[in-house]
Amino acid sequence: MAFDFFDSLRPKRKALDPDIAARIPPGQTLTEKWPVLQYGGVPREDLAKWSFRIFGLVEEPITLNWQQFMALPHRSYHNDIHCVTHWTKLNNDWEGVPFEEVLKLVKLKPNATHVMVHADINFTANLALEELQRPEEDGRSFFAFKHSGEELTMEHGWPLRLVVPKLYLWKSAKWVRGLEFMERDRPGFWESYGYHMHGDPWLEERYG
């Protein structure tokens, strides 16, 4: 049965400038803070043992260590983020590795259409491949390691989290450790508890 795990944590509403209000999806409330929400504890990462695996429907699976991942091209991003628990945080500045730079490391098989993102504490999030390949002007996805000029905190996903700006934030997996390419969609962690398989904030795709 679908449920809103953090419903009691909704921020209170306040009057907003119309231009700002236009950037906030239905059912959302603006926050200046960045709430820390997750199911379970916060993993303690050891970068000497950290790895990032790309597998599934690829010609040759690969595994990167932290140094190899951080050698990939970096760039800056600016976006808004929207949590299914009804808060929106505007004007986030990030530094990260573009999804397409990671994709260049493997050759996909023709039947790859979806991705399961794997993260620590056995978290997963499912995404359509085309969602991760949105163009720059439509909200490009990336792997972030900095926010507001500082390294991510452990609570927000240090050392690496995926950011998918056009979807609710649960799709932007914290402590990300790999990508599994698939020929069809299947539920991730929250989706298996009734959350929406896609998660578009503007359509209020909170539950399946």
Image (cartoon, rainbow, N blue to C red):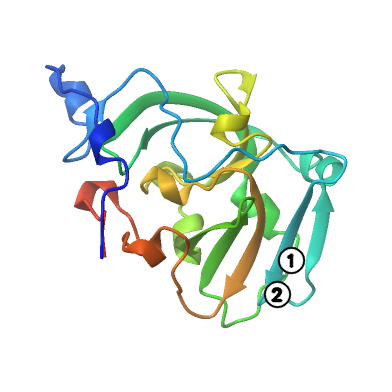
Q: Are there few (<14), some (14-19), or many (20+) residues within 10 Å of tag 1?
A: some
| Percent x, y of residue 51 | 79, 51
Instruction: Give the CA distance from mark 2 to mark 1.
Output: 6 Å
| Percent x, y of residue 124 | 54, 59
Is residue 76 something one can see in this rendering?
Answer: no
Look at label 2 and name its amino acid. Val
Relative to 184, 204 lies left or right = left
At 45% across and 74% down in the image, what residue appears? 185
User: Which residue reaches farthest front?
Assistant: 40
| Percent x, y of residue 24 | 23, 33
Disc 1 target residue = 106
Cβ–Cβ under 8 Å for marks 2 and 1: yes
> Quadrant of the image for the N terminus?
bottom left
Q: Are there few (<14), some (14-19), or many (20+) residues within 10 Å of tag 2?
A: some
| Percent x, y of residue 42 | 60, 38
Disc 2 target residue = 58
Nearer to the camera, 122 or 20 = 122
Earlier in the chain: of badge 2 and badge 1, it is 2
Tag 1 secondary structure = loop
Q: Residue 88 carries which label?
A: none
At 79% across and 74% down in the image, what residue appears? 60
Tag 2 secondary structure = loop
Image quadrant assignment for residue 10: top left
Image quadrant assignment for residue 72: top right
